Image (tube, grey):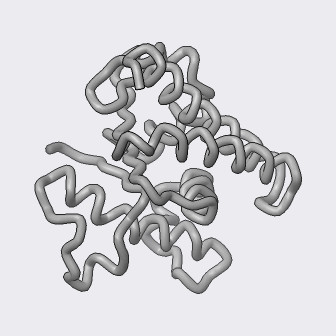
């Protein structure tokens, strides 16, 4: 994929996720509007993930993907910026193989307050968010040099979406 095509596709995929986050503030996951935006986001991500892992970072006024500036942050839905600031995220990482269930879990996680993520049980109504938080641990560890295929108790499965926060 040409660099200009990559920039456009990477920005479009993240905008689609932002649109889904916005829809989920209005409707439940099963609603047709949410289902449509989830499909749009998954389609955009799947297409661009053919080239490998994507690491999205918000830096001042720029959206950076895999070290390339792909868009101005002003072009990204506010829900994305709020997600980064609320959880003090450095990056959001997507790996090939991400599913609609993974995106739903990410969006549910984004709708929670940061302190609620720490106390959410995987079997509770917000369980998908807890599973997303658990699945996010390997990606954050990967950013610090840990093997994503590590089978230690911390890693319950290979993560397709990861969140990285804190200093590296």
In this image, 2 relative to 21: left or right?
Answer: left
The image position of residue 109, as x and y in percent, is 55, 58
Name the quarter where the C terminus is drawn. Answer: top left
Report whether 25 appears left or right of 122: right
Q: Quadrant of the rendered structure where residue 161 is?
A: bottom left
The single residue placed furthest to the right in the displayed view is 32
In front of the other: 119 or 98: 98
Give me the residue at 60% from left, 28% from top. 78
Q: Is residue 58 left or right of residue 164?
A: right
Q: Residue at x 40, y 19 (%)?
A: 2
Residue found at the far front of this picture: 1
Q: Quadrant of residue 55?
A: top left
Residue 154: percent from left, percent from top: 26, 78
Q: Count all numbered tags in the image, as a single digit.
A: 0
Residue depicted at 74% across the width and 49% down the height? 24
When asked about the image quadrant of residue 69, the answer is top left
Expressed as whole percent of the image width and height from the top left, the position of residue 163 reads: 37, 52
Q: Is residue 27 above or below residue 90?
A: below
Judge by depth and name the residue closer to the eye, 57 or 84.
Answer: 57
Is 141 on the left or on the right of 76, as rendered?
Answer: left
Q: In this view, does 73 lie above or below 14?
A: above
Looking at the figure, which quarter contains the N terminus?
A: top left
The residue under the point 70% across, 49% down is 38
């Amino acid at each position: 994929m040409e660099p200009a095509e990559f920039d456009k596709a990477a920005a479009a995929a993240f905008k689609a996720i932002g649109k889904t986050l916005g829809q989920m503030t209005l409707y439940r996951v099963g609603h047709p509007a949410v289902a449509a935006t989830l499909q749009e986001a998954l389609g955009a991500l799947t297409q661009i993930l053919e080239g490998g892992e994507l690491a999205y970072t918000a830096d001042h006024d720029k959206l950076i993907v895999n070290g390339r500036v792909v868009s101005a942050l002003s072009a990204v839905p506010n829900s994305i910026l709020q997600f980064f600031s609320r959880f003090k995220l450095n990056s959001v990482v997507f790996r090939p193989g991400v599913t609609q269930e993974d995106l739903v879990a990410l969006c549910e996680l984004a709708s929670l307050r940061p302190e609620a993520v720490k106390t959410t049980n995987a079997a509770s109504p917000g369980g998908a968010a807890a599973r997303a938080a658990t699945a996010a641990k390997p990606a954050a560890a990967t950013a610090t040099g840990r093997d994503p295929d590590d089978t230690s108790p911390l890693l319950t499965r290979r993560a397709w979406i990861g969140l990285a926060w804190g200093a590296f």
